[in-house]
Image (cartoon, rainbow, N blue to C red):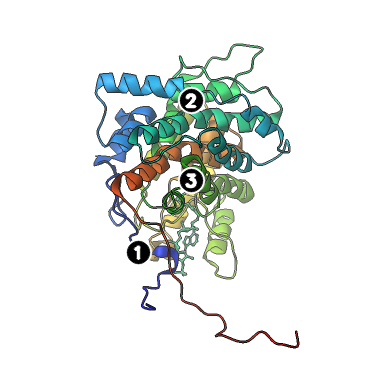
Amino acid sequence: EGLFTYDPGFVATAACESGITYIDGAAGVLLHRGYPIEQLADNSNYVELSYLLMFGELPTAEQYRDFAGTVGRHTMVHEQIVNFYKGFRRDAHPMAILCGVVGGLAAFYHDNLDITDAEQRHVSAIRLIAKMPTLAAMCHKYNIGQPFMYPRNDLSYAENFLHMMFGNPCESYEVNPIMAKAMDRIFMLHADHEQNASTSTVRLTGSTGANPFACISAGIAALWGPAHGGANEAVLAMLDEIGDDSEENIQRFIDKAKDKNDPFKLMGFGHRVYRNFDPRAKVMKETCDEVLRELGIADDPQLKIAKRLEQIALEDEYFIERKLYPNVDFYSGIILKAIGIPTNMFTVIFAMARTVGWISHWNEMISNGYRIGRPRQLYTGHTKRDYPSSH
Ligand code: CMC
């Protein structure tokens, strides 16, 4: 009693064993079930990667067909969920809506849910993966006052999401294959990242035996902050604020980021685990160049600013000494913007893609046996004192 390891921020504490994702931060390596992220990004797709994360192996052709078919059949949400959306202010941030509606799903799948049953855990995971794009697109449609679009199960995962985001009931909407491919790649690059703040939150919440939909809602809340998933939205705000790519202007912002008396940080830079290039950022940068070229967007001003900023930062002593490199969020926003996704939806997309990671970790924890997560503290308050009789 009383002899605890004091580790604020959990920089040196492993809270679980896991066989899902491996990161070597010094070498800039990320493996999902042993497969390098670069190879998955080039050769796989989000639904296949979801299968891999959940089950540990790549699916056979038949297993893939079955899995994709099952995900496809669970894309609709209960019509009553529509009422839930209508209770929010029109201009509510879509992350606020998402936290609410995903937690609300627990009300639809709670009473008979036995989390000790592997089959029921599996169905819960499928429901979440399948319904997240529907719920996410509904947040956007509600914001802009357009009718909600029903999912189309003849489309791929990414195509269906774009259809629900940009389609409307009055005219047919052709999904641009370049955008669908880029979207799918963004989903893959965000699918899992071992014990980050949101995944740890899902595990901690799940360790009490809570409903899995409620656990994912807790994960969404943890992801929202600008130090975590909210960074993608913050990067675009930062690029807007920087405004132009002249050397002296960018240097001014680099100097602000280095100034310890200024709260400004380079958003999309730095990572707790990577002390080298975030391998996801490399793939993201290539994808960004590819997508903008294919969409015929020449000389995107924000991309120019981002590249210049990266270059100047990587040559600066401050960033070199602290091993600060661009992370996954640095280039993703520029691609999302080129696809036409509004900035306030960036973190929603991160949440959607990360859902498979969260639920795979939850399932791994429940399957392997676990104890309730219960950190200790170093007490710094008063010693015992008596309530004053005069009070
Ligand atoms: N700009 C300027 N300085 C920075 C930055 C930055 N983006 N990131 C870290 N530093 C400095 C920090 O001030 C500290 O300096 P010193 O040693 O002089 O006190 C040093 O680098 C070490 O950083 P730290 O704060 O100890 O690192 P951490 O592991 O506690 O925090 C982080 C990691 C990601 C929260 C932080 O780097 C950050 O806030 N980055 C910007 C936000 C961001 O891009 N987040 C997305 C992370 S990747 C995707 C995801 O997880 O969702």
* Label 1: which secondary element: loop
Q: Visible in this render: residue 185?
A: no
| Residue found at x 43% / y 45% | 328
Residue 231 coordinates in the image, percent (x, y): 53, 49
- Label 3 or label 2, whichever comes before in sequence order: 2
Q: Is mark 3 within 8 Å of ligand 1?
A: no
| Relative to 100, residue 238 above or below | below
Q: Which residue is mark 2?
A: 179
Between circles 1 and 2, the one closer to the viewer is 1
Gap in angstroms between the C-alphas marked 1 and 2? 40 Å
Residue closest to the eye, 93 or 301: 93
| Residue found at x 50% / y 21% | 160
Q: Could you say which disc has been placed on residue 232 in the image?
A: none
Residue closest to the eye, 305 or 8: 8
Residue type of the residue flagged with mark 3 = Cys
Gap in angstroms between the C-alphas marked 3 and 2? 31 Å
Q: Is residue 317 left or right of residue 77?
A: left
Q: Which residue is mark 1?
A: 13
Q: Could you say which disc has been placed on residue 215 in the image?
A: 3
Residue type of the residue flagged with mark 1 = Thr
Residue 190 coordinates in the image, percent (x, y): 42, 40
Gap in angstroms between the C-alphas marked 3 and 1? 22 Å
Q: Residues within 10 Å of mark 1 (few under 14, many from 20)?
A: few
Q: Are marks 3 and 2 in contact (CB under 8 Å)?
A: no
